[in-house]
Image (cartoon, rainbow, N blue to C red):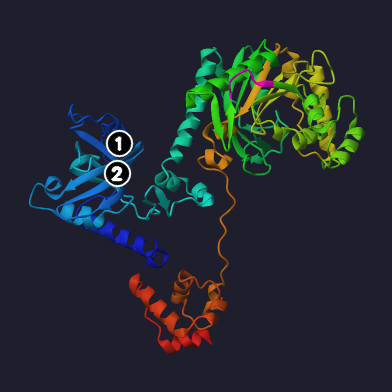
Amino acid sequence: MMNNIDLSEQEIIRRNSLQKLRDLGIDPYPANEFKINTSTRQILEQYDPEKNNFQDVTIAGRLMNQRIMGKASFAELQDESGRIQLYVNRDEICPDEDKSLYNEVFKKLLDIGDIIGIAGYVFITQMGETSVHVKTLTLLSKSLRPLPVVKEKEGVLFDAFTDPEQRYRQRYLDLIVNPQVREVFVKRTRIINNMREFFNEKGYLEVETPILQPIPGGAAARPFTTHHNALNIPLYLRVANELYLKRLIVGGFEGVYEFAKDFRNEGMDRTHNPEFTVMEIYVAYKDYNWMMEMTEEMIERIALSLHGTTVVPVGDKMIDFKRPFKRITMADSIKEFTGIDIPGMDESALRAVCREIGVELDETMGKGKIIDEIFGEKCEGNYIQPTFILDYPVEMSPLCKKHRDNPELTERFELMVNGKELCNAYSELNDPIDQLERFQEQLRLSEKGDNEAMFIDMDFVRSLEYGMPPTSGMGIGIDRLAMLMTNSSSIQDVLLFPQMKPEKKAEEDSAEMFEALGIPTGWVEVLRKLNYKKTAQLKEVKASKLFNDLCGYNKKNQLGLVNPGMDEVTKWLN
């Protein structure tokens, strides 16, 4: 049970109202179904006074505003689709002699944030506002914490709930007081549904693969580790679902895809979260040229579905997703932005080049990682409009088939948009001997200290030995795609519950340190509530002020403590 000392004044008032509701015989958390038959949006968009429709409506939502008057008052109700004004008349909701539902409950015991259900009919007020004339009112859930009050004057918001850290930590509150945030997540779901429809129309099968894996394969990334107690073995959270999906191609499925949660124990920033959503698709008898065309078709379709146009605002830029997208090889891109021709260079030559152009490296990096660093530092950020980067060096792509015209390269592309990678695709490597050699090279990198090198998955090699048809695969980051399509600058804005650092708590002295000054145990927490977290702060306050603050807090919050005398408080401070 919470003591009053742990609560704010508003929280105490709401708990008192909760008890008064129960004393009146009103269950503040009823269990029975409340049947609704419309929404605020439907009413506001479809009400027609000439048709006299919506004359028997039942809606439910959160009480967001009250304008209490005499026998009649106005309020605002917010449901999932929007807000609408309510007109509440005492004699309408209390047709009998007992007027307590209006005089006590509606006027005194309901608070902003309470969830109510109402039934009534729609009309237009003399001020021209579409409203619901309430005939019955039911409390569905009592809110015990006050909402942040967002004020609006002449179209300008004041005291808005805008602090990003608070919004991400308390997304439920963000969704209540910033209802426009919901649109981001509605669009995110529409993106996923659109992709799913696109693949299903082509006859591809949606599947599920393991999240807990004995070998974290399919990507060069640092995994999260855990332990399976019953089997007494280490397991890893999935870093990619690629190898399992390709096993299904070996098994005879010709097109499979999965929306997967992947986990990488790496850094966090505006475009990276340790838990993220990826869609991966693999189609037999296709190559990376075919996959490029399918990828741009899919993304163009998503843009048109969400925006009605291929031109999408992203920050201060306008990005056009109309196909075909630009194509350029990685070697040509590096040459364009650095003047350096990398084909044929060995690791030592590449290291020398990096020293010349100011790209920092470490000793664990092999040739592939070095080329990746050059591209990332000097080229990637220049690609604002959708651009396919093609034909990566073989050292960068251990799961990709060698290029049909140049064995030093692979048949791989990445799609760059707004200076970041959006998707990655291959003509998949299906030569088991070549695959094992590539895995062994990754092992050598791991022994050099590269903690993102791939593990060797011998079962996957075994599956390839049974034969995998020519296949193309593609993975696309759903979070980054949602950022682009919703004009969101941070990945946290498109994740309902992003990973956050632990909340910082204000440092405070122990209770024993306060008690050493002669302060009774019961008053230590009161001092902390008054923001005296450290005993040193007491040296900076006048005894008279502290005395008044303590006695006032005791009375206001009905703590029942025996007030200290002025002399006693003075001794604490000396």
Residue at (39, 80) in percent of width and height: 548
Near mark 2 (Cα within 10 A), the count class, few <14, some 14-19 or many ≥20, is: many
Q: Secondary structure at mark 2?
A: strand
Near mark 1 (Cα within 10 A), the count class, few <14, some 14-19 or many ≥20, is: many
- Mark number, residue 40: 1
Q: Is residue 42 visible?
A: yes
**For residue 144, what is the image quadrant?**
bottom left
Residue kind at label 2, given as amino acid type: Leu
Q: How many discs mark residues in the rendered view?
A: 2
**Observer-nearest of 201 and 140:** 201
Asked if disc 1 and disc 2 are in contact, CB closer than 8 Å, the reply is: yes
**Observer-nearest of 211 and 301:** 301
- Magenta span: 321-326
Q: Is residue 547 above or below residue 99?
A: below
**Observer-nearest of 55 and 157:** 157
Q: Is residue 402 above or below residue 367?
A: above
Residue kind at label 1, given as amino acid type: Thr
Residue sitting farthest toward the left: 97
Q: Position of residue 365 (x, y in %)?
A: 83, 37
Answer left or right for 113 relative to 137: right
Task: Check if residue 311 falls in the magenta segment.
Answer: no
Residue at (61, 16) in percent of width and height: 294
Residue hosting label 2: 77
Q: Earlier in the sequence, mark 1 or mark 2?
A: 1
Q: Position of residue 90 (x, y in %)?
A: 14, 50
Q: Is residue 558 visible?
A: no
Residue at (46, 40) in percent of width and height: 181
Q: Position of residue 174 (x, y in %)?
A: 45, 46
- Mark number, residue 390: none
Marks 1 and 2 sit apart, C-alpha to C-alpha, by: 8 Å
